[in-house]
Image (cartoon, rainbow, N blue to C red):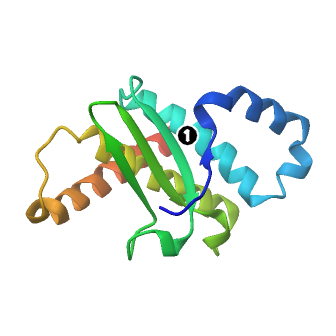
Amino acid sequence: MGSYPKIACLIATGFLMSAWGQTETAATDDPAQVAQKFICEKLAVWQERLGLDDWRISASFVHRVDLPRKTMGGIRWDRNKKTAEIWVLDASEYNLPRQAMLDDMELTLVHELVHLDLASLPRGQASRGSEERAVEGIAQAMLRLDRANR
């Protein structure tokens, strides 16, 4: 998936938070910094909600050309090591208002985490389309509930 740097959510979350607080005015103008902070926060929230606390999960922003056609993200995992890497479409690839972009990024993140949560189920090409529809429905339902409670 290209040579894009991983978002330092797990190791440096405290640093990112304090750096955000110190330069909040400048950072709020930079969609990349806003997206990075947002994804770090949401990864921690959804990882806990889905009971994936024992996994080491990282996230990377990638460009559209680095993703399969008609996708906004992706995931690769190793069940034995309990590690996963999620790819989220880079902020520079969006032509949406900021909140709509962040909402879409969160949907992508939750979608990929649901795939990870279902990793123990048998997988195959024949069931791929059904899995995608189910994962998307679950992710959208979870986000609707979360947003209704805000």
Reply above or below: 5 against 130.
above
Instruction: Please state the total of marks drawn on the protein image.
Output: 1
Side of 75 where 30 appears, left or right: right
Side of 134 where 142 appears, left or right: right
- Occupied quadrant, residue 17: top right
Q: Residue at x 22, y 55 (%)?
A: 134
Label 1 element class = helix
Side of 25 where 100 appears, left or right: left
Q: Residues within 10 Å of mark 1 (few under 14, many from 20)?
A: some
Side of 77 where 124 appears, left or right: left
Residue 103 in the image, given as x and y percentages of width and height: 55, 56
Residue 82 in the image, given as x and y percentages of width and height: 34, 31
- Occupied quadrant, residue 48: top left
Taking the view exactly as shown, the residue that stands out farthest to the front is: 3
Residue 14 in the image, given as x and y percentages of width and height: 72, 26
The residue closer to the viewer here, 51 or 139, is 51
Reply above or below: 117 against 104.
above
Reply above or below: 89 against 23.
below
Q: Residue at x 64, y 45 (%)?
A: 38
Q: In which quadrant will I find the C terminus? A: top right
- Mark 1 sits on what residue? 42
Q: Residue at x 27, y 31 (%)?
A: 80
Q: Residue at x 46, y 37 (%)?
A: 57
The three-letter amino acid code for the residue at tag 1 is: Lys
The residue closer to the viewer here, 47 or 102, is 47
Residue 75 in the image, given as x and y percentages of width and height: 38, 52
